[in-house]
Image (cartoon, grey):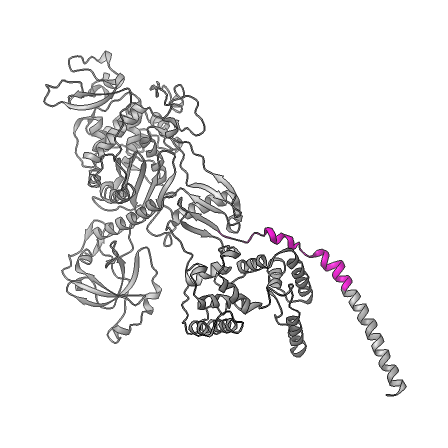
Amino acid sequence: MSQQSRSLVFFIFKWAFIVGIVISTAVGAYITIVIIPNLPDSQTLKNIHLQTPLSVYSKEGKLIAKFGEKKRIPTLYDDIPTMQINAFLAAEDKDFFQHSGVDFFGLVRAATQLILTGEKKQGGSTITMQVARNFFLTKEKTYIRKVREILLSFTIEQQLSKQEILALYLNKIYLGHRSYGIAAAADVYYGKPLSALTLAEQAMIAGLPKAPSAFNPISNPKRALIRRNYVLSRLARLNYINKQQHDDATAQPITSRLNSLAIELHAPFVAEMVRDEMHKMYGDDIYTSGMHVYTTISATQQEAANHAVKNALHDYDKRHGYRGTLGHIDLTEQDVSNLDLTPLASFKLIGETEPAIVTAINDLGITTLTKDNQPNEITWDDLKWAWPYINENKQGKQPKTAADILSIGDIVRVRKKPDNLSYELAQVPEASGAIVAMNPDDGSLTALVGGYDYFYNKFNRAFQAKRQPGSGFKPILYSAALSKGYTTATLINDAPVVFDDAGLEQQWRPENYSGKFFGPTRLREALTHSRNLVSIRILRDIGVNYVRNFAGHFGFEPSSLPRNLSLALGSGAANPYQMATAYSVLANGGFQITPYFIDKIISYSGDELFKADPMTASANAAKDPDDLAIPTVTSPEDALDLNSEDTRPLSPKKATRVMSSQVSFLINSLLRDVVKRGTGRRALSLGRSDLAGKTGTTNEQRDAWFNGFNPSLVAVAWVGKDNSSPLGNRETGGRAALPIWMSFMKDALKGTPNQELSQPDGIVGILIDPETGLKTNPSNPRAIFEYFREDNVPASAEQNNPSTNSSAEQQTIEELF
């Protein structure tokens, strides 16, 4: 090489060196001055809050629902199976526990790929670098971001242990189908906890980070299988598993299917009530902050409520006939053993019903095929109800054979019977139903169903509806009358009457449900048999405003109640939740309660954010004052505070008494008679003596209710149509709603002893003449036993003097009405 050539080479190297120094200095200065000061504080990873959905539980801790876009189940490092960790290391970063956060050889490979192809590809990223990117950086692929990623990785490795870094990674990564973190992925793809996954399933999940949306086993099972087997081969190559384990796992087929989160208790209407309440309290943070809400819901009672509503609505449908098939397909040229089930795809599962194709018919039965290709035999006993539906009061000709109802190729709905052993022909119920159960001591909600199927129709009829309560309001009216001086033996005339009520638009001619009139009727008999005309006369006597304000103590808003005599028949508006609140006052001895359904709220970190502290009726038991004297009410304003002179200041946990213990005893006695021998007597089949309640049926059977309780549990059942059309003749509260209540109470009270009605001081029992309501002696062959307050004992027939009796007893029936 000549001198001139050597000089040229030297010149080039010198300037290359100088330029390199300058560039390195500039890059170093840029990193030092611009990048490093603006790096996020990796120390925050020690207290990182992963976006976690809101979780709702029953009082026993059973999962009811999760709310949030991201499905995530945070998992501690120690709870992650070792093989699952090994699978991720084999797939993503085999030297994780050896390197300092950056794989320089990997970076060199990525740089070489860039030089050779001119394309920037993801590569060389360690798990630590992925943590830095996932928690602090954007997804854009730039050199500056890569530098920041490397620098952050060094910092993270200095401040966190390898185990902490790996736990962050495995809880943060997106693994497809809205699952974030490995525990959520195990639940979504396999419906299992991490500890229950097989080796093949662990490898499948470990292979997801590369392309979680495109190559998961649901979206692309073929590509997912290739990736899974690659992870298994890496595990074998790194000696995490032996050849036998590898071969066995590789031979396993894909078992993934899309699973919803493992809901342990079906209570979607309750879940939505909780979500709405939480959103009012905390806003949109509830979807990401990982709060845990424990409700007052009893799992046993909720399950009983679910079954009760569904079974009763299907029974209602059977009473009114079959509305027809969903469709029909021609099976004449199809092989039934290999039937195309595609036509069923357009029909959803609704409640307990699922679509099926009729594949065979004999005289007294059919065979159907459901979406899962399972044949089901349906016998005549489960078909014969299907008389053709004409309207709510009329059906067509009675079917004699299965062919009178269906044809081969018909698309129908079937339902697994309550015994879970066989199927029946079914349809989505035309009527809706609801039930609410509540602890009367403190108002805690223990069960709620707001309709047949929440996912078919989300309207919560138990909580949001406004329906007329009908005769279910009468116990409140009668309680007001007893508080005003009436007795259980007061006689009121049950006779036709026409009212020109200023609050009504036209003349009103009310009548009893039976259309009959029974003349002078004792108060007990009037409530037991739900006599409408007696109730109207009582309301007219004691005053509409008095009753409206009295009802305010039962949870009703007085201003929302009618200002006319139709109030006596329950013409206002209420829902089962409100009615359960009102009947809790009747059940708990006369104390006003505030209903609630959230017991406590726990933060993501385990701190208690809220704990319910309800006022309770039982808190008054130790020191019950001398009960309420019945005040003289001279105006609606006075009626707003009926007990102001007689109640002592209560501690925050003591519920306010709004009805004397004597009146409470009397109204309970009346309502127990409704069950023993009145409109609720079907409930006697439960074999209990401590049940009380009242049916409710509105005009043209548009609403059917049963409101009932024992001393420890209130339950209100309702049946009606969402468009308020009639349910049909004879679909009264005792026929349509009472079966829901009975089914629920049978399960809810199972194993609990009867609770007899405790007679308080100030109540006496005497013999009366049932025709006059007056005191009599044992020699009277008509004599019956009746309860009275000590200061309201009626005179004997010989002593009956209007000047010495209470205001309600002073007048004859003719004078009063």
Q: Residue furthest right?
A: 3
Where is residue 171 drawn, in percent x and y? 53, 58
Where is residue 170 drawn, in percent x and y? 53, 60
* Image quadrant where one finds the C terminus: top left
Seen in the image, is 245 located left or right of residue 710? right
Highlighted range, magenta: 28-53
Q: Quadrant of residue 172?
A: bottom right
Q: Is residue 279 visible?
A: yes
Q: Is residue 212 visible?
A: no
- Secondary structure mainly formed by the magenta segment: helix
Which residue: 15% across, 18% down? 776
Seen in the image, is 77 located left or right of residue 762? right
Seen in the image, is 620 located left or right of residue 799? right
Q: Look at the picture and state if 513 lies above or below 621.
A: below
Where is residue 788 drawn, in percent x and y? 24, 21
Q: Look at the picture and state if 280 lies above or below 349.
A: above
Where is residue 85 drawn, in percent x and y? 52, 63
* Image quadrant where one finds the N terminus: bottom right
Does residue 114 belong to the magenta stretch? Answer: no
